[in-house]
């Protein structure tokens, strides 16, 4: 297993929490040489599963975004996953089997004010998942995505600690609580497994019933 990120120290800390042999791949997936990095990794270690889990969040009014800010989110949330998937698919082509899993968001199919750019990129990533499934299917590579709801991650720690938000989720979700980060893992393991060998172009929503509940 290889884990990627821009900060080698944080990568090492993440690797230490994983009960497996983990190698570090520190590079920025939005950089111009990112595809070459993936090709190099595949040449050295092989590559049969790619999880596109990098993303940026931008909560601000649309009028406050300048074009550079729009491009920064689009590059990280949509363009980079496309480039990573393309590079990975090349490496997977000869094996007849490959798994590409994109992490989207429930912000793809629904929207709220102050999140237009983020919603655009996550909706685009879901559409890209379907398009790549069509492109890579003939070589035996499946492409699916996972759309998380509200998860108590490190990034959301401040919001997760707000009792008002917790009370709102108790009313708004079927399960009545925040999701735990490890609860996304099951969907990823399933999509990466042989049990999902005839599933492609799909998005699995992991949101405690948020989209189904009213």
Image (cartoon, grey):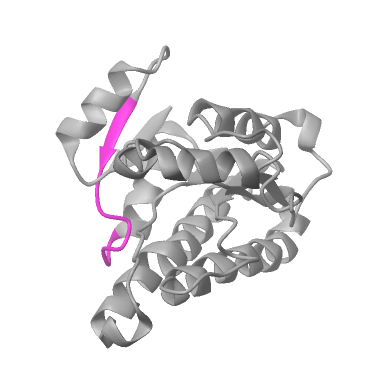
Q: Residue 85 lies in magenta, yes or no?
A: no
Figure quadrant of the N terminus: top left
Considering only vertical position in the picture, is 62 above or below 166? Answer: below
Q: Is residue 156 left or right of residue 141?
A: left
Residue 164: tell me if it is visible.
Answer: yes
Q: Position of residue 199 (x, y in %)?
A: 80, 46
The location of residue 184, given as percent across then percent down, is 57, 34
- Residue furthest right in the image: 198
Horizontally, residue 139 falls left or right of residue 111, namely: right
* Position in image of residue 68 (x %, y %): 24, 81
Whether residue 50 can be seen here: no
Which image quadrant is residue 191 in?
A: top right
Hey, which residue is sitting farthest top in the picture?
A: 19
Secondary structure that dominates the magenta span? loop
User: Closest to the observer: 178 or 125?
Assistant: 178
Q: Quadrant of residue 114?
A: bottom left
- The answer to whether residue 11 is left or right of residue 76 is left
Left or right of 148, for residue 143: right
Q: Residue at x 54, y 34 (%)?
A: 179
> How many numbered circles does the render carry?
0
State the extent of the magenta-drawn residues as a range.
23-33
Residue 214 vertical position relative to residue 10 in the rendered view, above or below: below
Q: Which sits in the foreground, 171 or 80?
A: 171
Q: Tell me which corner region of the image, top left, top right, bottom left or bottom right, holds residue 134.
A: bottom right
x and y percentages locating residue 160 in the rendered image: 39, 38
Near-viewer residue (80 or 146): 146
Work out whether 61 lies above or below 14.
Answer: below
State yes or no: residue 27 in magenta: yes
Q: Residue at x 59, y 47 (%)?
A: 101
Q: Residue at x 77, y 58 (%)?
A: 138
């Amino acid at each position: 297993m290889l884990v990627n990120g821009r900060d080698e120290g944080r990568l090492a800390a993440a690797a230490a929490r994983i009960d497996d042999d983990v190698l570090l791949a520190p590079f920025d997936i939005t950089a111009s040489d990112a595809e070459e990095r993936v090709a190099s990794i595949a040449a050295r270690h092989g590559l049969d599963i790619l999880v596109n889990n990098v993303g940026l969040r931008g909560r601000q009014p649309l009028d406050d975004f300048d074009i550079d800010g729009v491009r920064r989110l689009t590059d990280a949330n949509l363009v980079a996953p496309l480039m990573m998937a393309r590079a990975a698919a090349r490496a997977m082509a000869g094996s007849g089997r490959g798994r590409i899993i994109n992490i989207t968001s429930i912000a793809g199919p629904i929207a709220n004010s102050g999140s237009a750019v983020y919603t655009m990129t996550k909706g685009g990533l879901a559409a890209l998942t379907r398009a790549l499934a069509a492109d890579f299917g003939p070589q035996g590579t499946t492409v699916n995505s996972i759309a998380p709801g509200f998860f108590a991650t490190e990034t959301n720690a401040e919001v997760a600690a707000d009792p008002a938000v917790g009370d709102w989720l108790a009313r708004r979700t079927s399960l009545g609580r925040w999701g735990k980060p490890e609860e996304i893992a099951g969907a990823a393991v399933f999509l990466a497994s042989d049990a999902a060998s005839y599933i492609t172009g799909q998005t699995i929503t992991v949101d405690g019933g948020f989209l189904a509940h009213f």
